Amino acid sequence: MTTVNEKNPSSKPSWEPGARRTIRDSRILALSPEPIMTGERAVDVNAWIRRKTDSWLDLQGGNILFGAEFALMFLSLTILVMMGGLAMMVDFYIGHRRLNWDPVLFLGGMNLLITVPWGLYMHFLGNKAVKETPPVRFNRQRREVAIPRWTEGKEFKLPFWNDSAGGVAYITYIGTIAAVIVPFTLEGESAEYVRWLVTIFATALAVETLVLGAYLYIALRLKKKRDPKLVYEIYPWEKLVAYIETRQDIGPGLMATHTVLTLAIQKPDDPESALAAASINVGHETAGLAQWECIRQFMENGPEACPDPKEDETLAHYKAKCRHARKEMSVLPWLGKKVGDWFFQRYLAHIITERRIKTLALKSLPDDLNAWSAPLPKEQWAKPSEALQGLNQQLTFAYERGLKFTQMGPVSEWQAGREEKRQQKRGRGRFRA
């Protein structure tokens, strides 16, 4: 974790709050440095607020609950396959018929070789995504912002490994496992021949497991050492660059509009480049202002002025939602909902999601960030600058008169016009006297 100080006075940004720019297909509305009030309501439109304490606030995106449900769907498929195999065995037993092991082994093999591996893969992929999307943290007591970035360097590529090699290895390994099982289904073959086939394929499976396991173990350890490392850049809150960018992407048969709120730390030697940055999808400029006000209200007025994290991904909210659905729904729709809840294992998905938000996402953060986030005695709290307080006081009066932040233009022009009107009023007063 490093602290960035503004050493070069010429690094002052070329925009200011209220200024607008047009760059290629993008329209930009500047919000900070000097994070002045915009007059909008503080609304966490896209549920970016993950954690909030008296001293710090975390912004972190991603639909973690959906990822958990999608992975657990494979668990439900596994259970259904096992139930299908069990039903076949019961049917043969009740009918006093000789059990045909082919469909049972086929279902078991499909379950073991496809459904279970894909479920585990999706689960660990979700864990990896949470670790690799660290939060942006705002410390109101220090009046500083911590923005994550990955140290420079190329991502380490495993030798002799790519998507094609991974697919070939997976298919080969599955095929070898299937080859170990198939001899048991052969009819009319001698026991010695079956044992001979099983021995050959089991030996091949053991060799593949040993070689593949050793390769992945060594390669992943090398990858962990050489991959870019997560660091946090610390920057003063009042110098943070923030803007809303509305961009139009035009394709052969499609035109889409994207709006993002960007928070950036400037490079000391290049004010037009970012040392670290984070972007939040907001959908519309008004939503971006509401999201920005969540951050600004927390930093300026405390946690009570900022919305709490959404409870949609908590187990308590899911239980309350189920109780409400039972009261409001008739029997058939409620049963349909329960089937869907079971298929996506939503109860377990909420437990996993809470663990990822409260535990897993915080484990990957640097220890220095935890020390920086520790509460301070109130007498050590940083104070807002007099310039920012003066601007906010002037803007409060302007908003009370019906003016809007998006229509007032850059702060300097607005202040110049305001001062000019004052002088005109004073001049008219002296003339009448």
Image (tube, grey):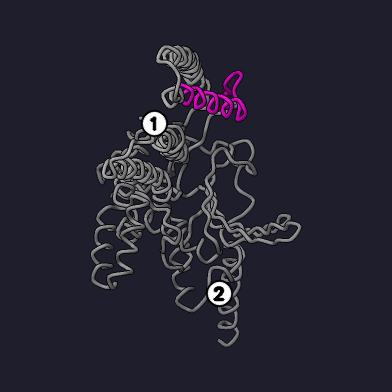
Kindly identify which numbered label has been placed on residue 206.
none
The residue tagged 2 is 422
Question: Residue 235, position in %: x, y?
Answer: 47, 41
Residue 166, percent from left and from top: 56, 27
Instruction: Give the quadrant of the C terminus.
Output: bottom right
Q: Secondary structure at mark 1?
A: loop
Query: Which residue is at 52% across, 49% downward?
Result: 263
How much space separates mark 1 and mark 2, taking CA atoms?
Answer: 52 Å
Q: Is residue 65 above or below residue 324?
A: above
Tell me the amino acid under the disc marked 1.
Pro
Numbered-mark total: 2
Q: Secondary structure at mark 2?
A: helix
Foreground disc of the pair 1, 2: 1
Depth check: give the residue in front, 322 or 209.
209
Amino acid type of the residue that numbered disc 2 sits on in the rendered structure: Arg
250 in relation to 141, above or below: below
- Quadrant of the image for the N terminus? top left
| Apparent side of residue 273 relative to residue 189 in the rendered image (left or right) | right
Where are the magenta residues, as a range?
155-180
Residue bearing the label numbered 1: 366
Location of residue 413 by image quarter: bottom right
Q: Is residue 128 visible?
A: no
| Helix, strand or loop: magenta stretch | helix
Residue 81's x, y, as percent?
Answer: 38, 43
Tell me if 375 is positioned left or right of 433 in this view.
left
- Crowd around label 1: few <14 · some 14–19 · many ≥20 (10 Å): some
Residue 158 lies in the magenta stretch:
yes
* In front of the other: 62 or 412: 62
Q: Is residue 111 visible?
A: yes
Q: Is 31 situated above or below 272?
A: below
Name the outermost residue toward the bottom.
Answer: 432
